[in-house]
Amino acid sequence: MTFSLRRVSAILLKDWYDLLKNSYILFTLSFPLLFAVWLGNMDVKSTYSFVFPINLALVICGCFVQAAMVAEEKEKSTLRGLLLSPATTLEILIGKSALSAIVTLVVIVASIFLTGFKVPSLPLFSLSILLCLIIYIAIGTLLGLLSRTVMETTIIGMPILTLLGMGSVLKETIDNKIFAKIVDFLPSEQFNQIAMNISESNNSGNTGKSLLILLVWAIVSLAITVITYNKRRFDK
């Protein structure tokens, strides 16, 4: 079966219309922008502060919203029909992820504009955001597939979302070397490291290492999501 842009577009348009009707998700999307406005009105110069709204956008828009939309499909019993449709695994996963990806990128660009962040080394910065986007959307899709309702995504996903979004803060408050080491390998921390390295125009070796870690995260998260999707597709 060949790849069909028409089927992907149909899934994307359906999600778009569903999103416009969901005030809860629309309200959730505003949080990164509110933080960006707040930081933009403060005399903040640190790179970490500038990238915090970007990380927040990845977690909330890319991960949580994606999980909520997939879980909502399950709650309405419409996901089963999609899973059993002629659409291929690739078409469904791209179609279900496209809206979250577009919305996340729009929020990230708006956050950068609102904070006044001058993006250093646009190619490297864009590559790191792309890898993070793949990771967070894959994790969001996985959480949605594992949840039975939208509310359940909050219960199941909150520890993961908190760790991804507030890892640096938790590392400072929890005095545990093992926990700190785990947090250091999270996508959010690697993204922070890349942003700081390219802002300071040094540590190119560390930047390459962080990009490699993000690439591994992307491959593993995609693989687990596809396996879980196929299991849900053929489960009775």
Image (cartoon, rainbow, N blue to C red):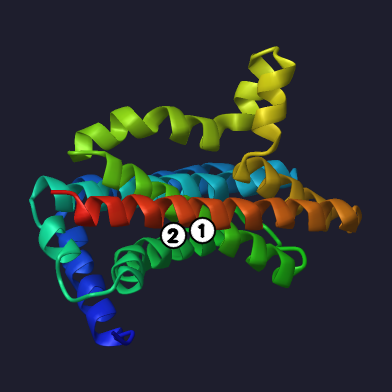
Residue 104, numbered label = 2
Against 184, residue 145 (above or below) is below
* Residue 56, above or below 134: above
Residue 187 horizontal/vertical position (percent): 61, 45
Q: Which label was assigned to residue 203?
A: none
Spatial separation of the CA atoms under disc 1 and disc 2? 8 Å
For the point 57% across and 64% down, the residue is 130
Q: Residue at label 1? A: 133
Left/right of residue 145 with respect to residue 44 in the rendered view: left
Image coordinates for residue 86, horizontal then vertical, percent = 18, 76
Looking at the image, is mark 1 or mark 2 earlier in the sequence? 2
Is residue 43 at least partly visible in the picture?
no
Mark 1: which amino acid? Answer: Leu
Front-most of 126 and 82? 82
| Mark closer to the observer (1, 2) | 1
Where residue 16 sits, quadrant-wise, is bottom left
For this rendering, which residue is in front, 174 or 138?
138
Residue drawn at x 8%, y 51% is 77
Marks 1/2 in contact by CB < 8 Å: the verdict is yes
